[in-house]
Each structure stands twice: as structure tokens, then as C-alpha cells.
Image (cartoon, rainbow, N blue to C red):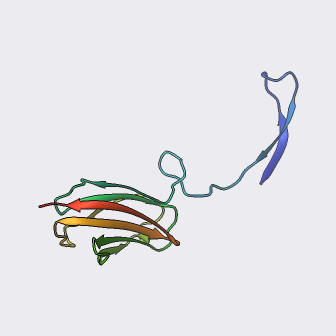
Amino acid sequence: MTLTGLLACSCFAASTQIKVQVQPPAAPADAEGSAVAFALSDIVPNPAHRLFRVSFSLPSAEPARLSVFDISGREVASREVGALGPGLHNLALGDREGLRPGFYLVRLSQAGKSLIRSVHIVQ
């Protein structure tokens, strides 16, 4: 949408013609009003004793999956997270998945994009 009009302000010597273009945001906004990007932010604690929290953000409500892989590349846990919708999210993993001590990869996938972070489970 384009708006055109006169701007009358004491900061200008005369009325000034301005043109403003208004466009919808490219992505949803978080509580502070900034655009939400596809991101796999943090895994805490790391190293962890079974239970850890994964922080991530989704730009849309499209199907998305958070998966955990062991060092051999075998998927050992997976959760559908797209239904959480756009925005910032924090999800607990590890306890119900029964992960043994070792190194794991956590992958967030949505719309053909993937991000990977590692987590170390200790005794």
C-alpha cells in the first residue's frame, strides 16, 4: 500500500510532500516486535544428565521436526514441533527418550532447511 500526503511540521520551512510505502512483515514477530527467524539457538545444560532443553524458533506453522541422532547417525528420538506455530520455543528432551551417555546431534528441520547442534549426555 502506498500513502502520499503533505507533512506540515515546525521542523520544515514549508510543507513537504512525502511518500510512504507500507509492506507486511516478512516473518512473524516476537514479543519485542523483531522478526522471528528459523533458528536452533541453545541446548542447556550441555553436557547433560539425561534431561536437556532445546531452544529454537520457527518462522511459520509449517510442519517441523526436532530429531535426535546418535553418533552412528541412527535417529533415536523425534518430535513434530510445527504445530507449536511461529515464535520462540523451549522443549525438554532426553528423559522420556532414555538416552544413554554419549554424543548426540539435535536437528531442527522445516521447509527444506535444517540446523544441527550437538549435545553430550553424561552419567
Q: Nearer the viewer, residue 118 or 81?
A: 118
Residue 12 position in % (x across, y down):
82, 24
Above or below, 35 against 98 in this view is above
Residue 98 position in % (x across, y down):
18, 72
Residue extending furthest front?
72
Above or below, 33 against 59 in this view is above
Q: Is 25 placed left or right of 55 in the picture?
A: right
Residue extending furthest left?
123
Residue 62 position in % (x across, y down):
50, 72
Q: What residue is drawn where x is 20% and y is 57%? A: 48
Query: Where does the C terminus fall, quadrant-wise?
Result: bottom left
Q: What residue is drawn where x is 63% and y is 55%? A: 25
Residue 100 position in % (x across, y down):
16, 70
Q: Nearer the viewer, residue 83 or 121?
A: 121
User: So how many labels did they put on this image?
Assistant: 0
Above or below, 11 against 72 in this view is above
Above or below, 2 against 61 in this view is above
